[in-house]
Amino acid sequence: MNQIVLPVVLPLLAAFLMQPLARVSGLLARVLGPLVLGLSALILVRLWLDFGEAPFTVAIGGFAPPLGIVFYADHLALMFALAVPVFTLLFWPGLGEGELDPDRRARRDALVLLLAASCTGLALSGDLFNIYVFYELAAVATFGLATLTGTARSQVATVRYLLISAFGSALALVGISILYMLTGTLNLGHLAQLAPHTLQGPLGLASFALMLIGFGVKAELFPLNAWVPEVYATAPARVSALLAGLVSKLAVLVVVRLLVLVFHQPEPAQLLMVLGLLSILTGELAAWRAKDFPRMIAFSSIGQLGIVFIAFSISGDAGLLAGIAVALHHLIVKSALFGLAARWNGSLDALAGAARRAPLAAGLYVLFALSLIGVPPLPGFWAKLLVLVGLAQGGSTLQLFALISVLLVTAVEASYLFRVAVRLYGQSDSPPAPPARWDLGAAAALGAVLIGVTLTTAPVADHLRNVAHQAGNAALYVDTVFPKTVAQKD
Amino acid sequence: MIEFSPMISVEGVIYAGAIGLVAIGALGLVLCSHLFRMLLALEIAESGANLLLVLTGFRGDSVAPIIGYGPAGAPMVDPLPQVLVLTAIVIGVGVQAMAASMLIRIYRTYGTLEMAELRRRMELDTAAAAGIPAPTSAQAPAGGRPLPPVPAFRPTHAARVRES
Amino acid sequence: MRNIASLMFTGGLVFLLLVIGAQLAFGHPGMQVGAEYLRVAGPELGAANLVTAILAGYRGFDTLGELSILFAAATAASLVLGHRRSDARRDPTGGLILRAGVELLFPLLVVVGVFVVLHGHLTPGGGFQGGVVLAAAFFLVMLVDPARGLNHALIGWIEGLAGAAYILIGIWALVAKGDFLAVMLPTGVMGNILSAGTLPLLSVSIGLKVGSELAGLMANLSDAEARDQ
């Protein structure tokens, strides 16, 4: 069980050695990245298959918590940890379109491996400062990857993203200081034990708000998402797919762990609900007005993440289940859409007639659009239904307002998504280039997963219910971390 | 607890200083339009946050957490915030180095570091790359209608007199 | 108008934070975990400098993440800056004072850097601090003679191997003891250079990695031209 560290450590090792190895053997450097990611995926799959019902912890270095750092693995953590190498492989920037300069190629691969390692660490870590360090690593890796095209406009967009992100991290550090001052520990399990006595007042709330500003930048929370449209419009499409799909979900996961384990008061949830509402309204309306395809799905991504936050702000297992469902659905659909947008990155008018040259891609787009809007029996419908039911059962005015907003916003989504679909199947003399083979392959694979989930909705829903129940059980978390401090060695 | 007066203590001053630094950084980021000044404001904010973090471990009348440094049995300050700040400072250095390199490249291409001008140029370039009309009205006035023809310049009688 | 609104908003925020913070007991920390560290870190790891004991021992994984962040930043910076054109104008070489000063300072800085790295577990210091001093030493040489560039291939190898050494020590612990980054090698007598298990080795690898990385980063930055010539 201690090999759960390897999916984080092996990509780091490969990244460190990537550049010197590229000078020795170009072929080895090209193959090393996907190889290491495949190995990580295999380790995680084996751990998942061996996983019983009880979560386990691994104390890194053999130092028992709260002195050392623990990795906590329950269903939710393993699910997202497994998603990281899988999606990084699917959207590996080295496939198809390649850099010609081996030096640049090695550096790009190293940055992608660092991103994968940090995202896996974010999913598994059980220590607050360790989460902060991995979050920063993910941030720096994405800064480097977002400027991959080398154009000056991508650098301006990335500098703006960097300034917002780094300032958010400074505020998160202030929040962590306040938290440490109040409780004296950084281990999430220990914090869960101490929270009811120490974090109840306005001080606890202030520290949550500050940390939310820090972690909310990547989770595209309003008002910290000013960087989103520009970066997604200027970064390479595969990088945007990883950013919008993978990294944002892991940032949301961090916020959810904080909410479930440490901050039990109603105010943080209300704050999340309000910010989620603002995200939905601003995001979807901006998507309706967008003029090019990448920006349209970038704004739509803001809107969907707003729905995720609203879902997680509903208390209890119902909220967790709804949030996890929407988050997973968004992960699959949005990554695939960005994959399709690699070649379709012109204006929306230029997309006319694309279905003629790329019928599979256009069909996939329609499938994803229907699922995003929430047409039964696709998974998007079930996910949105869970959110609406949770909001209706809540009953407070704010939640009813959120319910109406989600319904309104669904109508707006339908409008702009269908606008594009109509144009795709329209007539044109100069249809755009079809998506590249690898992008199309990744999108098709994700489309197949979507259809597979549609056909097996009941077992998937049961499994997710299990996952949500386990994730929401703070007492189970504390009992697993203390006193079972060192995992059994196989 | 070392006190300068009954009301002001060392940790109170440092706390106010740390919060003040973060506030100066925040103001700088919002008010400045020059990218390099925004980067400096970010550095100030990060220094403030680091200072606050190291303050959480401070104990008056304690020695550094090194065995053999002070008299045996003397209380030591909390070592954990110092470790955290070490990490945070290095992270800050990395981010600032990256930002500086991006600023160099931006200046090389666009020739300016003013944020407003850079955003305008970025929007124009992005729109041009995507093949859509630019979002600012100066490039696409009145919904795409062509501008009225500018009358040819006819020098006035006074100007003609001046020239001769 | 925007200035006044921002000033008022930030002023309000600062006032709020100050009022909130006045309730925090600075100067009398709770020290839940801190007291435990002070009690057990010395005997368990054998390092006199408890900060290094935590940095490379208890929270060695955080330090690995930190090394990766610095590596990611240096890699991204070199991706952004690209190669230098061979016909570009170079900065002028340093003057007499700088050259004479560097001749004196360079060996001193290297010695101090190596000392700080090696004594990380005994006196204040460690891999990061010593590595930065080493990088500063090489940067002074770059300032004196900008035309003599740094050997980027060598820097790449030192950087990569030092970082790999840190992880490989951890994997050795994983294979031998079952825990990644557990402390191997005997703890020895506190106060000796060869004490505290693998902590000095980790400090050396951190120092080499940080030093070479920052030197390469500064070489990249100084090579980059400000304007297209």
Image: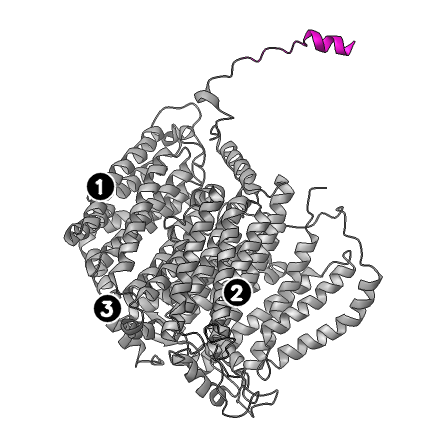
Q: Which residue is mark 2?
A: C68
Q: Is residue A183 magenta?
A: no
Q: Which residues are magenta?
A: B149-164
Identified at 49% across, 54% down, the residue is: B26
- Camera-side residue of A129 and A376: A129
State which quarter of the image contains the N terminus of chain A.
bottom left
Closer to us: mark 2 or mark 3?
A: 3
Q: Chain of mark 2?
A: C
Identified at 55% across, 59% down, the residue is: B44
Query: Is residue A141 something one can see in this rendering?
Result: no
Q: Which residue is mark 1?
A: A407
Q: Chain of mark 3?
A: A
> CA separation, marks 1 and 3?
31 Å
Is tag 1's residue or tag 3's residue first in the polypeptide sequence?
Answer: 1
State the image coordinates of residue A42 (x, y, percent, origin top left): 38, 64
Q: Please, what is the three-letter code of the amino acid marked with disc 1?
A: Leu
Q: Residues within 10 Å of mark 3 (few under 14, many from 20)?
A: some
Q: Please, what is the three-letter code of the amino acid marked with disc 3?
A: Asn
Residue A136, relative to residue B162: is it above or below?
A: below
Q: Is residue B155 magenta?
A: yes
Q: Which residue is mark 3?
A: A473
**Residue A323, located in which quarter of the rendered image?**
bottom left
> CA separation, marks 1 and 2?
44 Å
Identified at 67% across, 61% down, the residue is: C153
Whether label 2 touches label 3, CB < 8 Å = no
Q: Please, what is the three-letter code of the amino acid marked with disc 2?
A: Ser
Q: Residues within 10 Å of mark 2 (few under 14, many from 20)?
A: many
